[in-house]
Image (tube, helix red, strand yellow):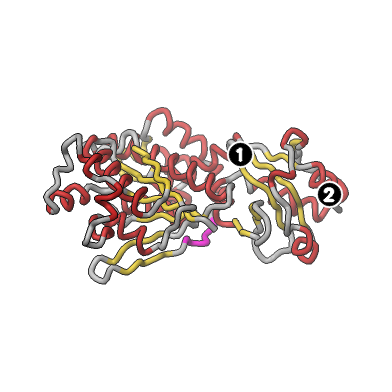
Amino acid sequence: MDKDVIITCGTSIIRNLKEMGLKPEHKDIFNKLSRSFIQGLTEDVSSLSAELSTFELLNLNNSDTSAFITTDTDLGTHAALLVKRICEIHFDISVEIKTISGLNLNNIQQFKRDGLSQLIDTLDYRVENDRNYGRSPIISISGGIKPVIPYISVYSMLRCVPLTYVFEKTRELITLPGLPIEFDFSLLSTIEKHFKELDEKACVSKSRLINVIGPDTFSFIEGLFDDAGNGKITPSIFGMMLFSDIEKASKSKVFLSITADKNYSRLNKKDQNSFDLLLERVKNPFWRSSKLYKFEGTDLNVWKPGNTAHRIAGWVENEQIYIAALYESHDFYERDLNGRKRNQYDIKTFVEWRQSIT
């Protein structure tokens, strides 16, 4: 499977090019970094930056892609352009630069209020797109932007995306898998309205929230908040992700292919109830990430909840979920899914799923 490396991009390339006698701040630097110059470098190209070292260790090829995450500064964007130039020539891969609006390291309030929200949205869009089109997303924190590293690390764990880091002294790649954890979304739904208030006011009274939901409930979800001072709290990165997922789930709809709809209609009530739970939960990005499974021989995503034969196969498009097939039998699932492709389905023929009436 082709890789898509999402990597934080620092500015070390500028310092290292200067040590080579180049002037990376000059406009003609991109002319100097010609194909013949880069291919003729006697030293290891990967030593020029942590990003390049990561690419080398991941053994990327020309069918792989990458996205550079940069700060909202001229220096950050310029450094990313320099690394992109070398990557595209040396590794022959396509690189896209994603400058995160509000990711300003000189303004902590803007960083937390605007930058982190934009960062999560950007990562979500990229990761979901990768999974929909058969690419394997990998997140790397080998590059700079140190204040962002803990947030991206949490993100990768919750979205079940492998996280890599180059161990500088031995130049080895460390990879951490995502965490297969679940969360009680029914509990979060009970305080969802208070997070809608946060969207409008950026912070709420801690004591008022405790009075409304109770101290026991608050102690369970306290990690979803950061202290904003003066008795106020604001969503943490974890909180932002989870409540954003609840909002997205409330706006998403599930559509069934003709075959899936017919299959659903003929099921007995017990199996219908099992699929109702699956089809409701698949709207939530957090749940989708933790239950995603790739089946060899198809470009459809498979979501399976655990120790049960019930599973669904489909894809996500514009935050709407399209289910091509429902499987209540594991044996039939293994025989039937191989060879099914997205291009075999016309979404115009899909029908909106309505939960069965008990």
Q: What span is colored magenta in the figure?
A: 178-182
Name the amino acid, label 2: Asn
Left or right: 324 as drawn, with respect to 134: right
Q: What main secondary structure does the magenta stretch of the protein show?
A: loop
- Secondary-structure class at tag 1: strand
The residue sitting at 56% across, 50% down in the picture is: 131
- Residue 317's tag is 1
Left or right: 280 as drawn, with respect to 126: right
Select label 2 or label 1 by which is in front.
1
The percent position of residue 84, horizontal first and vertical second, equals 33, 45
The percent position of residue 137, horizontal first and vertical second, equals 48, 53
- Secondary-structure class at tag 2: helix
- Residue 124's tag is none
The residue sitting at 28% across, 40% down in the picture is: 71
The residue sitting at 28% across, 68% down in the picture is: 171
Q: Is residue 91 above or below residue 27?
A: below
In which quadrant will I find the N terminus?
bottom right
Name the amino acid, label 1: Glu
The percent position of residue 205, horizontal first and vertical second, equals 36, 36
Q: What residue did someone put label 2 on? A: 263
Specify whether residue 125 is painted magenta.
Answer: no
Left or right: 81 as drawn, with respect to 20: right
Q: Is residue 322 visible?
A: yes
Left or right: 236 as drawn, with respect to 216: left
Q: Is residue 259 above or below residue 61?
A: above
Seen from the viewer's position, the closer of residues 96 and 329 is: 96
Mark 2 or mark 1: which comes first in sequence? 2
Seen from the viewer's position, the closer of residues 224 and 350 is: 350
**Furthest-bottom residue in view?**
170
Seen from the viewer's position, the closer of residues 341 and 165 is: 341
